[in-house]
Image (cartoon, grey):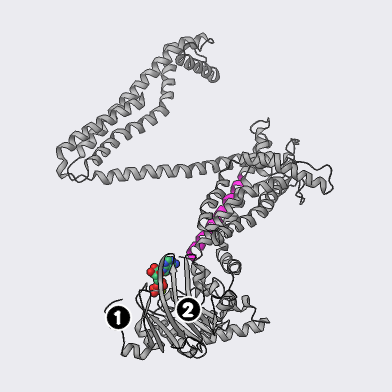
């Protein structure tokens, strides 16, 4: 994370701050996201993890009061530049939310949603192939292949979340942002999601927000610890958990607060 | 006078309760005021109930007494004649200068007056007695540990229950009376003829076969055409679009003034819409028809009425659609936007489908409102019962015909008048069904997001 240019990283944030009105939620954060790594954001609730994550696909644009400064690049191109097409950006940088949010449509239509709006499938069989491949990658295919026309909202919570992951990967993104994807799930469903993250690593650059430090330790190679909107410490997951450089990090991972 | 008595009873009770309360304030289970209310209720309610019953039965008691009095000896045996004399006597008793007629009535009047006063006194005395008895009973029950509070709550609850039942019973009553009059109609006209007959001309009714000109299909068609087709063609797109704009695009400030303004449309008296339809829209539609090559176009058209009705209905559709769009979780919207969908794609592919049940329910309610609407059609549509697909032609509706039938000069049990009740009943049933379906849809939809 030393070189500012030319970035070999998939995505880089440089001096990013986010304001909600006058209130600064993220303060001058710089971070890199790489293709073969899972990056975890940890930190106490309200420290700005979600807010920062949402700058990577410009979801903060949907909040009227939010303002982002600094620079974020995807393959070296500034995603906040005027000529950046948000629609294209979000097709390349997918997102999975904290609470599973499948559309009130069939399982098939949920996964087909992205390919349809981006015109990725030339034919119906094309579309079916994409849906099948995405569901397989999300580890959901075996469970739902006989009931693709059932409503996506009728699935269990864990299945819904994997459906949302399938929906995100159906448009073949390069980066997947996950905001506490397992926090609303039971331990078994959580384990499945973690397993899935392992399998997806390498194919996609993955950024995961979690408040669960064991989870961060299990799934990520890099961890960033946030506190009160600041990036306190950022490094290899193993190092950060075994030998934190900062006092605050140590306090946090030993459970002194948060 | 009765009210005054009630007030006096109430005041006495309050005074007594207050006196008692002051004595035993410390260890009362319920607050002194609650004891006061308890006593007050016992003082007021029984006499009021009694007076209500008394005022219902006392006229017949008065009548009996008067009939037995010696002054009534000269009364005719014919019930009809006797009643008319009695009625006159009553009038004179109330207002001594009213009478000029029957000498017998003049003679009876003082008797009637005296008897009435006597019964009134008896009633009032009994009421006062009851008030005292009730009050005394209630006071006697007051102990420090007496749960006056829960009793008062119970009574209040009963009162509220009765109040809410009144609306229900009124509806039921309306339904029963409609049903009753309708059965009388269907005794004279076969129901199939009424429901499936296609000829409607109540002005010329063949006494031997009244059903032949009382076929309601043209009315049903006109109602459907104006209220459910033309009006909805206006209301659905505009209502939906305004809801989408208000929930998805409008800034908070815009929404703050725009939503109430739109909802104010619903508060405009329908007569005003009627003027608008008859004086502004109808002539414009006529001009359009003339332009389209019909020089004899009537100024009363289905289109004019339907258009204005549609405008009137917009707030209904819009506010239901608004509510159901707002009920779609933001997570749904974010999910779609995060997939790279544009706002309009998100609206049309996710939000509106997700909100559809609510929107449909809103439309159903709007339809039921539209087909029951009267003023606009009375003012802007004609009475000509035609079955037509041409919106420029005139059409008539069930409500309009009910008005025509009931304002005509006909006896109250002619098929023509009774037809109005049958129409009313049909309309009632249809709107009721629409409402039930709509409410069920809404309920299911609510459950889906809870
Ligand atoms: N839409 C918003 N408008 C205003 N303030 C917000 C909004 N979302 C989050 N915040 C504030 O920004 C700070 C960071 O929030 P968030 O990014 O959700 O934290 P985390 O995900 O780490 O729990 C919090 O103080 C929160 O109250
Ligand atoms: Mg968060």
Image location (x, y in percent) of residue B397: 68, 44
In the displayed structure, does residue B83 sit left or right of residue B218?
left
Mark 2 highlights which residue?
A161
Q: Dot 1 lies on which element?
A: helix
Q: Residue at x 51, y 43 (%)?
A: B171
Marked residue chain, label 1: A
Task: Using the image as rendered, state which of residue B184 and residue B228 is in the foreground.
Answer: B228
Q: Dot 2 lies on which element?
A: helix
Q: Residue at x 55, y 46 (%)?
A: B264
Quadrant occupied by the C terminus of chain B: bottom left
Q: Identify the magenta region.
A: B425-449
N-terminal-most mark, 2 or 1: 2
Q: Against B80, is A49 above or below?
A: below
The secondary structure making up most of the magenta span is helix
Q: Against A167, is A218 above or below?
A: below
Task: Using the image as rendered, state which of residue A186 and residue B168 is in the foreground.
Answer: A186
Task: Using the image as rendered, state which of residue A180 and residue A24 is in the foreground.
Answer: A24
Mark 1 highlights which residue?
A248
* Residue B157 visible in the current orientation: yes
Q: Against A212, is B115 above or below?
A: above
């Amino acid at each position: 994370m030393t070189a500012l240019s030319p970035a070999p990283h998939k995505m880089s944030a440089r001096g990013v701050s986010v304001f909600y009105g006058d209130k600064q939620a993220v303060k001058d954060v710089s971070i890199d996201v790489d293709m073969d790594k899972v990056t975890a954001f940890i930190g106490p609730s309200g420290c700005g993890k979600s807010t920062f994550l949402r700058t990577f696909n410009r979801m903060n644009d949907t909040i009227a009061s939010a303002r982002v400064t600094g620079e974020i690049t995807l393959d070296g191109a500034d995603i906040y530049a005027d000529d950046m097409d948000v629609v294209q950006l979000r097709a390349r940088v997918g997102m999975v939310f904290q609470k599973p949010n499948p559309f009130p449509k069939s399982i098939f239509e949920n996964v087909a949603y992205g390919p349809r709006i981006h015109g990725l499938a030339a034919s119906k069989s094309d579309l079916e192939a994409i849906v099948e491949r995405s569901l397989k990658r999300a580890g959901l295919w075996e469970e739902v292949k006989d009931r693709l026309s059932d409503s996506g909202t009728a699935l269990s919570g864990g299945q819904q979340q994997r459906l949302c992951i399938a929906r995100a990967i159906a448009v073949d993104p390069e980066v997947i942002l996950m905001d506490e994807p397992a926090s609303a799930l039971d331990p078994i469903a959580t384990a499945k999601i973690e397993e899935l993250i392992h399998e997806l690593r390498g194919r996609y650059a993955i950024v995961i927000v979690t408040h669960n430090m064991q989870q961060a330790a299990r799934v990520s190679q890099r961890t960033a610890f946030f506190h009160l909107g600041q990036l306190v410490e950022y490094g290899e997951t193993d190092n950060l958990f075994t030998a934190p450089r900062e006092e605050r990090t140590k306090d946090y991972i030993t459970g002194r607060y948060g | 006078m009765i009210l005054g008595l009630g007030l006096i009873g109430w005041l006495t009770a309050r005074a007594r309760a207050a006196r008692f309360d002051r004595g035993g304030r410390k260890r009362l289970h319920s607050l002194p005021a609650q004891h006061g209310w308890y006593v007050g209720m016992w003082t007021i309610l029984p006499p009021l109930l009694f007076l209500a019953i008394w005022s219902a039965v006392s006229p017949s008691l008065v009548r009996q007494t008067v009939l037995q009095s010696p002054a009534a000896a000269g009364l005719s045996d014919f019930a009809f004649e006797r009643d008319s004399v009695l009625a006159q006597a009553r009038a004179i008793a109330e207002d001594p200068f009213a009478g000029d007629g029957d000498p017998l009535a003049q003679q009876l009047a003082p008797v009637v007056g005296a008897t009435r006063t006597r019964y009134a006194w008896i009633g009032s005395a009994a009421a006062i007695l009851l008030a005292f008895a009730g009050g005394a009973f209630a006071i006697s029950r007051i102990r420090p540990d007496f749960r006056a509070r829960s009793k008062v709550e119970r009574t209040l609850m009963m009162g509220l229950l009765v109040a809410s039942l009144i609306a229900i019973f009124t509806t039921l009553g309306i339904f029963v009376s409609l049903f009753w009059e309708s059965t009388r109609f269907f005794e004279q006209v076969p129901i199939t003829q009424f429901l499936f007959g296609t000829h409607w001309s109540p002005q010329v009714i063949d006494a031997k076969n009244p059903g032949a000109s009382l076929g309601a299909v043209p009315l049903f068609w006109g109602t459907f055409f104006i209220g459910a087709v033309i009006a909805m063609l206006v209301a659905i797109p505009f209502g939906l679009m305004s809801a989408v704009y208000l929930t998805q695009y409008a800034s908070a400030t815009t929404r703050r003034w725009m939503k109430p303004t739109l909802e104010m449309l619903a508060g405009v008296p329908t007569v005003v819409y009627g003027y608008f339809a008859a004086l502004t829209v109808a002539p414009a539609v006529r001009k359009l028809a003339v332009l389209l090559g019909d020089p004899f176009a009537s100024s009363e058209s289905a289109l004019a009425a339907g258009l204005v009705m549609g405008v009137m209905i917009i707030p209904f559709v819009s506010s239901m659609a608004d509510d159901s769009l707002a009920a779609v979780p933001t997570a749904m919207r974010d999910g779609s936007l995060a997939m790279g969908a544009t706002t309009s794609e998100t609206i049309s592919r996710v939000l509106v489908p997700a909100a559809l049940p609510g929107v449909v329910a809103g439309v159903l309610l709007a339809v039921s409102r539209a087909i029951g609407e009267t003023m606009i059609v009375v003012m802007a549509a004609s009475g000509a019962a035609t079955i037509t697909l041409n919106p420029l032609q005139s059409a008539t509706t069930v409500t309009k015909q009910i008005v025509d039938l009931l304002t005509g000069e006909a006896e109250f049990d002619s098929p023509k008048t009774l037809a109005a009740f049958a129409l009313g009943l049909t309309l009632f049933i249809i709107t009721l069904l629409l409402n039930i379906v709509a409410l069920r849809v809404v309920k299911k939809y609510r459950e889906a997001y809870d």
